[in-house]
Image: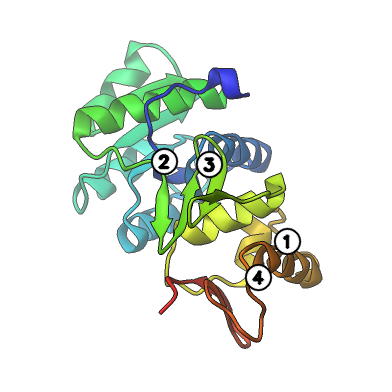
Amino acid sequence: MADQRLPFPCMADILLIEDDVAIRTALSRGLRELGHAVTSSPTALDGLRLAVEDRPDLIVLDLGLPDLDGVDMLRMLRAVSRVPVIVATARDGDAEMVPVLDAGADDYVVKPYSSAQLDARIRAVLRRSGDAPPGPLEVGGLSVDPRARVATLDGETLDLTPREFDVLHYLAARPGEVVTKRELLTEVWQLPYGGADKTVDVHLSWLRRKLGETASEPRYLHTVRGVGVKLVEPS
């Protein structure tokens, strides 16, 4: 809800490492609604790979992972990266917290917690680390403000549905990067096992219309045949 959002502008690329699919899905959705771009993983080793390859702004790490304990994963991560880490777990008490903080965690939150509470922790950690990213995303004359959930084109506000905004925001956070339809279905629609590609096509068509372009004469949204779509600054 809007009244839960604090005014500090902080859209971050978050890597969520959580094995519980219900928690992972709900938390990913909640953080996106609060303005963050979220990638998720259900295992420690895959999360470690994503941390190294994607270089997120911050990691939210569960401890009870199926392949490796979160504390061990944190020690492995600290050998190669100083990315801020918030441990989010059901474990509490000094006996649990002290080893986690000693292993290199930047903060520790105990389940259950809300997306808004975690968002406040994220912003605080990023402020302390000096890595707080800027708010609105700018690509050419297009501006996407994830905290206000407002997009403008050449200064004019775009009339977008919530889903259209989410698609545009996801693409604007990755300018020039080709994003597959399956990725959009997974990350925006929260359909981890796939879905109808036609749904993505329809929303991209609506977005193009509102951006004043067509698939045959694109300006911002360019289709890469057989791969996906990318958002680029008009030449």
Q: Amino acid at mark 2?
A: Met
List the residue tagged with mark 3: 18
List the residue tagged with mark 4: 181
- Evaluate if marks 2 and 1 touch, with contact meaning CB atoms under 8 Å apart: no
Viewer-nearest residue: 231 or 37: 231
Please tell me which residue is depicted at 53% across the width and 33% down the height of the picture. 34
Q: Viewed as shown, does residue 68 lie left or right of 4?
A: left
Mark 2, secondary structure of its residue: loop
In whole angstroms, how far apart are the C-alphas of marks 4 and 1? 12 Å
- Mark 2 and mark 1 lie on one chain; the one further toward the N terminus is 2
Q: Amino acid at mark 4?
A: Lys
Residue 217 at x, y = what percent?
61, 84
Please, is residue 43 above or below residue 132 in the view? below
List the residue tagged with mark 2: 11
**Which mark is in front, 4 or 1?**
4
Please, is residue 142 above or below residue 127 in the view? below
- Mark 2 and mark 4 lie on one chain; the one further toward the N terminus is 2
Label at residue 193 = 1
Mark 3, secondary structure of its residue: loop
Label at residue 166 = none
Q: How many marks?
A: 4
